[in-house]
Image (cartoon, grey):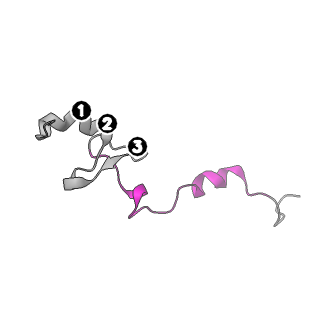
Amino acid sequence: MPGDQYSAPPKEAHGRVWYSHPREYGKGARSCRVTGDKKKNGIIRKYGLNMSRQAFREKAEEIGFKKV
């Protein structure tokens, strides 16, 4: 029965609700400053880098890090 309080919400509404909470702190708020990806695992935050592991490996020598 349409409009019944026990029926599932329309499918269009689900898209608007999903991931709608603002991310101000925590893992969901941080992104890679090189690629902009939020979904990557391994954001390096030390020294204010805020880069994904993959981007750091590509740019490490340019930044001044050396392998010992």
Above-or-below relation of 2 to 36:
below
Task: Compare residues 39 and 42 and report the one nearer the observer.
Answer: 42
Q: Does the magenta-highlighted stretch encompass residue 10?
A: yes
Q: What residue type is labelled 1?
A: Glu
Q: Is mark 1 on a helix, strand or loop?
A: helix
Seen from this angle, which residue lies furthest right?
A: 1
**Label 1 packing within 10 angstroms: few (<14), some (14-19), many (20+):** few
Q: x, y percentage for residue 39? A: 43, 45
Say which residue label 1 marks: 58
Residue visible at 26% across and 41% down in the picture: 34
**Label 3 packing within 10 angstroms: few (<14), some (14-19), many (20+):** some
Q: What element carries label 2?
A: helix
Seen from this angle, which residue lies furthest bottom?
A: 5
Q: What element carries label 3?
A: loop
Q: x, y percentage for residue 15? A: 60, 51
Tags 1 and 3 touching, CB below 8 Å: no
Numbered tag placed on residue 40 in the rendering? 3
How far is disc 1 from disc 3 in space, using C-alphas? 15 Å
Q: What residue type is labelled 3?
A: Lys
Q: x, y percentage for residue 28? A: 43, 56
Seen from this angle, which residue lies furthest top?
A: 58
Say which residue label 2 marks: 54
The range drawn in magenta is 8-33
39 vs 19, left or right, is left
| Mark positioned earlier in the residue sequence (1 or 3) | 3
Numbered tag placed on residue 22 in the rendering? none
Q: x, y percentage for residue 47? A: 19, 54
Most common secondary structure along the magenta stretch: loop
Q: Quadrant of the N terminus?
A: bottom right
